[in-house]
Amino acid sequence: METVREFLASLDPETRITVERLREIIATAAPGLNERIKWNAPSFALGEDDLITLGLERRGGVRLVLHRGAKPKDVSAFRFDDPAGLARWAAPDRGVVVFQTAGDMDARSEALRDLCARWVRCVAAR
């Protein structure tokens, strides 16, 4: 299995900067998460449940996915608010934010930190 360090070493410099800054934001937003490589990218889990996963966009950029694991779960009673409108929500429990550059990510870093912290609190409470 690839380590986070090996994953980072494989990236071009601009993408690596973006990924490292995203990892820092997630780590400060939710310090209790475990980081590992899952789905070929860094993923942050509470126990064995992955909650935030990074990924590389085919046309450049990095995506951050807020989710409740790999398997679909009942969303009938699930509610989460994204007041800053950072994510595109494919489902009530699956939001995606895409950053083309580190500068793009830096401009939204505080709102993103808040979003990640609230996401982990919301999902952990269920």
Image (cartoon, rainbow, N blue to C red):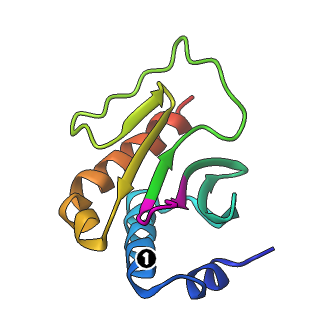
Give the SS element for disc 1.
Answer: helix
Looking at the rendering, in which quadrant would you find the N terminus? bottom right
Question: Would you name the residue on which mark 1 appears?
Answer: 15
28 with respect to 36 (left or right): left
Compared with 106, 48 (above or below) is above
Q: Position of residue 15 (x, y in %)?
A: 43, 76
Residue 38 placement: quadrant: bottom right
Which residue is depicted at the point 25% across and 61% down? 109
Please say whether residue 58 is one of the residues in the magenta stretch. yes
Total marks placed: 1
Instruction: Determine whether, in the image, residue 99 is placed left or right of residue 124.
Output: left
Give the residue furthest to the right: 1
Residue at 30% in and 53% down: 112
State the image quarter where residue 35 is shown.
bottom right
Residue 7 in the figure: left or right of residue 14: right
Q: Residue at x 46, y 34 (%)?
A: 122
Judged from this view, the residue extending furthest toward the left is 107
The structure residue drawn at horizontal position 75% and vertical position 76%, both measured from the top left corner, is 2
Q: Residue furthest front?
A: 59
Q: Which residues are magenta?
A: 53-62
Three-letter residue code for mark 1: Thr
Quadrant of image for the C terminus: top right
Q: Is residue 76 above or below residue 64?
A: above
- Residue 68 image point, x, y percent: 60, 37
**Where does the image place residue 121, in percent across and percent down from the top left?**
45, 41
Residue in the foreground of this view, choosing between 40 and 22 = 40
- Is 64 or 24 nearer to us in this picture? 64
